[in-house]
Amino acid sequence: MDYPKLNEYHLKLWNDQACGVCQRGPWTPYPPRGPAPNRLCPTWEQHRKISYSAQGWIQAGRTLLEGKLEMEPKFVEYVYECSLCGSCCNSRCVVNGDQVNIIKAWREDLVDLGHGPTEPWKKDAAVIEKGGNRFGRDQKDRAKWAEGMNIPNKGEIVYFAGCVASFRAQELAQSSAKMLKAAGVDFAILGENELCCGNPLDQSGQSKAYKEIAAKNVEAIKAAGAKTVVTSCACCYHNLAVEYPKVLGELPFQVVHQTQIIAEAIRDGKIKPTKGVEGKVTYHDPCHMVRLGSKVYKEPREIIQSVPGIDYKDMHATKRVTQCCGRNPVEQPELSMHTGKDRLQDVRDEGANTVVTACSFCDWNLKRAARNEGDESIKIVDINTFMLETL
Amino acid sequence: MDQKLVNRLKEIVGEQWVTDDPWELCAYARAWSYELHRRPEVIVNPGSTQEVSEIMKLANETITPVNVRAGGTTNTGAALPREGGITLDLCRMDNPIELDEGSQSFSAQGGVTVYRIIKDLAAKGWKIPWKPEFGNAVTLAAWVNFNGMGVGGSVYGRVGDFLLGLEVVTPTGEIVHTGSSHFGKAAKFTRYQGTGPDLTGLFLESLGTMGVITEVYMRMYRIPEAKQQVDFAFPDEETVQEAVRLLVEANISYGICVTDDQMSITNQLPPAPGKWILSMLAEGWQEEVDFRVKKAHELCLQAGGRAFVEGERTAEWGSAASISLPYEPSRRQISCGGFHPIHKTKEIFDHYNAVGEKYGLNRGMGWWVDGNYANNFPIYVYDEETDMDRIFDIIQEVHDGWIEAGYVPDYPGPFPNMTKHIEKSYLELYRTVKRSIDPNNIMHRGMPPDMED
Ligand SMILES: Cc1cc2nc3c(=O)[nH]c(=O)nc-3n(C[C@H](O)[C@H](O)[C@H](O)COP(=O)(O)OP(=O)(O)OC[C@H]3O[C@@H](n4cnc5c(N)ncnc54)[C@H](O)[C@@H]3O)c2cc1C
């Protein structure tokens, strides 16, 4: 069998109902499961063809297993189009939430067979292998953001900043650290021992490289003496909390998203916002915090709503059915831009002036989309920076 | 497909909206149906009526088959091409709906989903007559093409009963408006007018054979003050059939849906509190609803049923609530229903049950009322890899028995065991009309059956 990993989903590929829920939402559009959000699948929204939805990949995967299709470079690219945001996994159907797993399994087969990954993901792997981070930057600079902050490199709680906050948008890591301090949390960072969480490798089916980098991160965390790892990037959170145990087994520490710690600190009265914010505020749930194995949506809201007098409203498509921000600005720049713009439209439709996020990638993508549209009317801000302004 | 034709299609709609990559065609070769793969050769996503018109002209000139694909949920494969040709996907044609509150009507592009319409109308306090139970993928044009219905069918009948006209592109590429809007400065407020026969009906339920529906004009209603669902359990087919007869005769329901106890098992719901469950929905002014609910109790008890008691599961409407279920191991569901007179229900059910027993597949039976008759939707659960032969046999046997009982299918498809029952003169008239509107028989080949290709 040429595609053993894809074939593990054989029954689902054969019995897929081809019912359209992965483009448009579930069969029951009425409460409690409905109504469906106006948009569901980012690739379908961009291409407007059923082929660019889980239904398309599943039917093509089945046809491939039936021996009626041959892989060729353009076909490989097609398999790498999905952003794996998992929106379709919500729509209860025959595939039973395995849509993302099916595409990931297929990509693993493609890598094993030498057909994949496509160029951008290959480049990611090379850069990560060489330098330990996804931007090809010197690992020595990884903890530059923490200069002068006096953060130790050993401790029971480790803050895992992630590549984006370490290299690209250091203010995110700095705000996270300040908020952790405000909450009275003693924490350490791994410095240059913190490597990319490996997400691009996991997404693209480069499972061997992923396992290696995951193991190195786990070793570094263990060596730092951590019992808890805190992330402020939803993508890192998903990888450490959900994906690492799948490839490495049970981890010797717990993984939490920073919003869980801050919400608790607010509940305990350790953090007390005193200043209000102007205008209407909304929150964008990162996919990686609300589905694909995670359910962190109460805490960010608790945090934001603790701001005195805040005018907060959830926007369209939130929590479990949140809309993707665009996810992979480097590897899938067009899809990412299209999706980011769609999400900004939801913010506008809500009439909000500020959208708060809790993920370095969401922050990146939404800001990128706003810049591209020349729209400066919406403030896009990560939750820690937002909260610091209220203390 | 001839690459020249593909290039001309790209000239019409733009390169990104045409694809003939074989892996992409797979998605369009399958639908929510037991019909196995039938692949188009090229997919085109037009963005306007004008583009549809140019595509149809080109297809007609080159005698290329055209099939329209919407949500693909028509359970009998109507959304699939015969084989090859162009498949049109109108999902880009989904502009926001326009309300004409003065005429209590709205118009919308054909590619908008029905639920988007329901949502947008609700935001302004309006609704379409029915509350459908299908999935989110169904588009307005396809629903018209299928002449659908929904909860509300008891009082409102079917989509065709509230259609005020259409914008259609014919197979030869002409753009036609039916209903009042084809005349002078008239708005889209009535389907009927004195300028000729009801041409809207030509496209209604035509299953993609007569033209491409690009806009739909439809009646809307104010969201009522009150709604209430009441559920009753019945011990057998006779009593539930009698209850439905009484409710329809008394004209007190907005919607009536009946499901058997097997449906609960098939749909992974808690056990049904009776052999048959009848759910009636009433809506209107509060006093009116109170009266209807009271009357429903009287009539259902009179027929031999009992009202649900506290704690008993409220029936879920129809089958759609759990139509694509995450069975483990994975299984598909199909439905193969149609319409029958209410008083034939027992006969219909007995036959379906006997066939189900014979083949031993999990199944469930439901039906609801459209005006004065029943719309049934039997469900079978199967594994595509191992059960396909049985599925075709079952469908054949179910239909054979039902045809004897006086049922009509919701889509005969190009299946000889169904089409042989169509009256010859009816079929000839259908073919004559089809020939005059689609001289090269490019749209949905196979319907009507036996058209010379
Ligand atoms: C579980 C289930 C529950 C259902 N419940 C209901 C219900 O509650 N009420 C109800 O009314 N129906 C119900 N249906 C049937 C439903 O109405 C049809 O499946 C639906 O209308 C088809 O819409 P679609 O968008 O999926 O169209 P498709 O299946 O893609 O197409 C349907 C037909 O219309 C043609 N077509 C599509 N678009 C156009 C166009 N623009 N111009 C011309 N022809 C076109 C296609 O060629 C095809 O022949 C149910 C079906 C299922 C499977």
Image (tube, coloured by chain):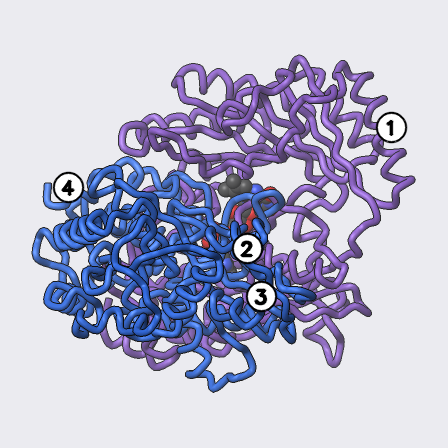
Chain colours: A blue, B purple
**Can you say whether A280 is above or below A104 in the image?**
below
| Circle on res. A282 | 3
Cα distance, mark 1 to mark 2? Answer: 58 Å
Q: Using residue A172 as the reference point, say whether residue A71 is left or right of it.
A: left
The residue depicted at 8 percent of the width and 53 percent of the height is A113
Chain name for mark 2:
A
Task: Work out whether disc 3 and disc 4 sit on a shared chain.
Answer: yes
Q: Nearer the viewer, mark 3 or mark 4?
A: 3
| Residue placed under numbered mark 1 in the picture | B294
Chain name for mark 1:
B
* Quadrant for the C terminus of chain A in the image: bottom right
| Residue B442 shows in the view | no
Q: Which amino acid does label 3 sit on?
A: Thr
**Can you say whether A61 is above or below A146 in the image?**
above
Task: Work out whether disc 1 and disc 3 sit on a shared chain.
Answer: no
Which of the 4 quarters of the picture holds residue A331? Answer: bottom left
Q: Which of marks 1 and 2 is in front?
A: 2
**Can you say whether A326 is above or below A58 in the image?**
below
**Element class at badge 3:** strand
Which of the two residues, B186 or A232, is positioned nearer the viewer here? A232
The residue depicted at 52 percent of the width and 84 percent of the height is A376
| Circle on res. A227 | none
**Element class at badge 4:** helix
| Residue placed under numbered mark 2 in the picture | A270
**Element class at badge 2:** loop
Chain name for mark 3:
A
**Element class at badge 1:** helix
Q: Using residue B365 as the reference point, say whether residue A4 is left or right of it.
A: left
